[in-house]
Amino acid sequence: MTEQLTVIVLAAGGGTRMKSKTPKVLHAIGGRSMIGHVLHAVGTLEPARLVTVVGHQRELVGPHIARLAPEAVVAVQEEQLGTGHAVRVALEALTEAGQRPTAGTVLVAYGDTPLLQGATLRDFVDAHAAAGAAVSILSGIVEQPTGYGRIVRDADGAVTSIVEEKDATDEQRAISEINSGILAVDAAFLGECVTRFTDDNAGGEYYLTDAVGIARGDGLLVAAHPVADALQTEGANDRAQLAELGAEMNRRILTAHMRAGVTVLDPATTWIDADVTLASDVTILPGTQLLGTTVVAEDAVIGPDTTLADCEIGAGARVVRTHGQLSVIGAGASVGPFAHLRPGTRLGVGGKIGGFVETKNSEIGDGAKVPHLSYVGDAEIGEGANIGAGTIFANYDGVEKHRTTVGRHAKTGSNNTFVAPVAIGDGAGTGGGTVVREDVPPGALAVSSGPQRNIEGWAQRKRPDTAQGRAAAAASDPDLAAGE
Ligand code: UD1
Ligand code: MG
């Protein structure tokens, strides 16, 4: 834990340009909310105190933060009177929580910068401490500085102030070094500084950036450290920017996996969330999305055209054109093409879920196979069992769900229906078209359809003037067939 570090994350703003009923910082990219990415980055610093400032839609933002960072103090800023006011509210909330920092560093970050990395913050906080500055700015050199506060330096290059766009002169607007918004401030200085902000500016707001001018006026040192990777401090204000940052995040995630030994055939059509874990020598084929906390073990091949959310895929498994959620696939198992794995599916080592098979809340044992066109719901299938093509596990009686068990090495026929609750014993079998309503003892063969009865000459008699009738007649009279 960094004893002397306090982190303030500002997230009270409205985010009107999102044009959304979802608060801006809760919009997700890479499988986390934007503020989730920021909390993750600051979390790696293990700050002694963390406070987040919420305002707009705090009934949604507050609980989300409490879930992700239960240790955080959540400060409410009723009216958004500016970043300086927000920081003052944050310090007041810390006071109330008995956590007000009197020494060390206060790091201020925004909740809408999803590409931000902990290492960048760590280097910045270290540089701030090493310089002995009262205020340090994580700045950026950008081609389009419009909208940002500009870093004003004197002839010696020392930072004298931050001037907001609205308050800047034409000359200042030409400055390309901008305030990313991330500041590190000496805690003792900040505590006193927040009481000195005024809203006497073009924005009519209490600017946190005025801390720079105040520090300089007090004869204290101010430093600015340009960030090498400016995208890390970029915020998403509308959905177009959200998509751009999302694509950039995906590129970064894919690059990291590829450098770690994962083959990604087509990065342009592959999407991998931030919390996905891939072992080396995994291969991802085009059109694949790996979402949530999906974990893939080595040598597995996923795709093409597969979406897996919160799944666990074993070593060497093969998952083709599949949609899966909250499912576990064993090592060396095979899934798809066109499989639908619904929550609670567990396929054993070397097992198979084949084409056009839907599974839900079912355990399919080691080496067991459901190869074709089936629905498997609320079932337990023993190791080495084989389920015939076109089998329906009828788990729902219209009111309640029931379970089916199929024993070890059982072999069931095609086009069966298992009417749950029902049990098929170890080594048992069923005939084609069987509707299993009663338990089948181990080793027994269950047959439910009656013996077949053929009514001879039916087509010739009943449909004489049709192609069917003529074909039937021809089949029974070789002369007729020759004359046709
Ligand atoms: C701010 C900086 C500017 C910097 C820019 C970087 C100030 C005065 N200006 O400007 O120098 O270049 O960010 O993006 O600090 N917020 C609150 N409560 C408030 C106001 C804002 O929590 O009362 C939060 C917002 O939710 C947002 C962040 O603070 O996350 C920044 O606010 P915003 O209004 O976007 O500031 P800018 O005008 O962009
Ligand atoms: Mg802004």
Image: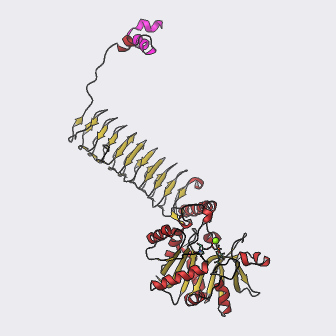
Residue 423 is a magenta residue: no
Ligand 1 shown in quarter:
bottom right
Residue 95 locus on image (x, y percent): 48, 86
Residue 431 locus on image (x, y percent): 28, 33
Q: Nearer the viewer, residue 17 or 123?
A: 17
| Above/below status of 455 relative to 224 | above
Main SS class of the magenta portion in the image: helix
Identify the colour scheme used.
Answer: secondary structure
Q: Is residue 336 visible?
A: no
Residue plotted at (61% across, 77% down): 81
| Above/below status of 430 relative to 290 | above
Hey, which quadrant is residue 34 in on the image? bottom right
Residue 483 is a magenta residue: yes
| Above/below status of 394 relative to 477 | below
Residue 25 locus on image (x, y percent): 55, 67
Furthest residue in direction bottom, as rendered? 219
Q: How many numbered callouts?
A: 0
Part of the protein shown in magenta: 467-484
- Is 354 on the left-hand or right-hand side of 38? left
Residue 52 locus on image (x, y percent): 51, 76
| Above/below status of 191 relative to 417 | below
Hey, which quadrant is residue 455 in on the image? top left
Q: Nearer the viewer, residue 146 or 153?
A: 146
Q: Is residue 454 visible?
A: yes
Furthest residue in direction right, as rendered? 171
- Is 142 on the left-hand or right-hand side of 82? right
Q: Nearer the viewer, residue 13 or 340?
A: 13
